[in-house]
Image (cartoon, rainbow, N blue to C red):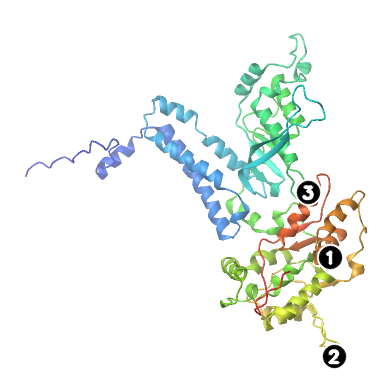
Amino acid sequence: MGKSKPNAVDPGDAYAFSDSDSDAASAASSIINPAAEALLDRCSTLLEEVESFLRQLRRNNVESSVELRVFLNQIKAEHRCIQGLCLEAADSTKSRHGVKACNLPYLEALWAAAKSTTGITALCKTFGITEQEGAREGQGEGRRGRRKKSSVTVDVVAQNGLQWIKVSLLTERRLLFELAKAGWEGGYDSDDSAASASAAPLATSSLSLTTLTATLVRAAAQHRVQYLHPTIHLLLPNLHPSPDTPELNAFLTTLTSLGAHIQCGTSPLLVPRSIPDLVADLSSPSTRRVAPLTDPLNLDTTILLALVSDISCTAAVPHEPRFHPAILKQLALEAAAAMLPTHLWPVLAGHRLVCTSAARARFDEIVSIVGSETERARAAALVEVLRPRKAAAAPPMSADERCAAFQALCVHPLPAAGLALPITTLDEEEEGEEGEGQAEGQAEVRRRVAAKLSSVNRSVFMAGWRKGLTTVSSNRGVAKIIEALVGEEEVGPDVYVVETARSLVGKAKRIEV
């Protein structure tokens, strides 16, 4: 027998990817760069966990509630970089520098911080800042400077937007180096006590973390969530909560004086939660709010229409040539995520439901003109539809009878916590008069908002404001108008905006709400 020829070697195959299986197994047993391989395993674990989180968000139709794209791209870029290091010799300059400068520990700390909080809305989100530049030297005091725009990135936006978390892996050694480089403003004598040294002001303008914290505080002052400003939380896992050196104590005091909350070291309160727990927290509309929903809830006309629409209550509505493009879009949205179980039941279940007389009148008008037979029947179960005087009055239905009648016309099961039917219509006395229960200083903002709303929207939103109720609406445009009209130190009405709307499709006539 002749000797077998050795496998041909490809001169372009620098890493022997074309070797036989036995050669590959042999190569696997001798890792080129153990440190880089360990980093790659950790990065792969992080990437898989974040992608698993994203997949579960998609399954629960809440992917849009959390901004993950920037953070995920950073992990993928780091993963590719580490893969390249794995092919470098462990003792090479490139490998040693790459392993030391790896950004993976920061990404891991950021993800751990995100899993330890609630109400996550974004990771690695950039917020804009607009500031007035100071008057130039030699200019009069009355002359205003130019407006300067900048931005700052927040690592974790949590608590439904009210908590901004910044993670820093700054070490005590690095911090002392920065302090020595920056020096003290005015300095202090060596004979001074430790207490007086700790009270000495730092040259904060030269310290990167101090400058960043000040920028975050200014940015938070320009952003509001439900009329509240976010708070700044700094996570410093590599710093001791009670440092021995006066310089470090003074530095932490400076950060606190800027308005930031500081967490040094590892805290037992920061316990990462499981992915299912995170997704369950984000899947409930009520937990995505800063303040709890009120009881009762004030419903506007858009929500009343969505409750009786054939689009949201039937398995499928056949497409017709007469359908407006907006109706076709709603049909596509309904096929992707059903309106009632996804958007409305989690909000309305277990709450008493009311509407204003103007919203009710508009609802009755649209149903009578546009509604199909099934939409009118649902409306009759939802509220007591006004009847002509000569029509025979049907005996009133009980709450259970209304729920049964509504369920018979809806393919989606009613919520387990129950649906409070009928929806109560507030009369003018119950809606309250302008000025009723009005806090001092609120008259001007209420007049300002009321002047910009239509008669129906004024009835709905102002009544909810006066009575302290959460108004549920799909009218995002009106909600944004109100938010823009409410000033910096003012508080507006509590509005819960449902992300999508449903119209009636009974007849080929379009009526604006």
Taking depth in this image into account, of 113 and 184 the one nearest to the observer is 184
Element type at mark 3: loop
Is residue 150 depicted above or below 290 in this figure? above
Circle 3 sits on which residue? 227
Q: Which image quadrant: the C terminus?
A: bottom right
Q: Which disc, if any, is residue 240?
A: none
Residue at 81% across, 69% down: 355
The amino acid beneath tag 1 is Ser
Q: Position of residue 438 (x, y in %)?
A: 91, 55
- Mark 3 and mark 1: span between their CA atoms? 22 Å
The amino acid beneath tag 3 is Tyr
Q: Earlier in the sequence, mark 3 or mark 2?
A: 3
Q: Earlier in the sequence, mark 1 or mark 2?
A: 2
Circle 2 sits on which residue? 390
| Residue 239 picture quarter | top right
Callout 1 crowding tier (Cα within 10 Å): few <14, some 14–19, many ≥20: many
Residue at 56% across, 36% down: 106
* For the residues bearing labels 3 and 2, Cβ distance under 8 angstroms: no
Q: Earlier in the sequence, mark 3 or mark 1?
A: 3
Is residue 236 depicted above or below 292 in this figure? above
Circle 1 sits on which residue? 459
Element type at mark 2: loop
Is residue 166 depicted above or below 287 in this figure? above
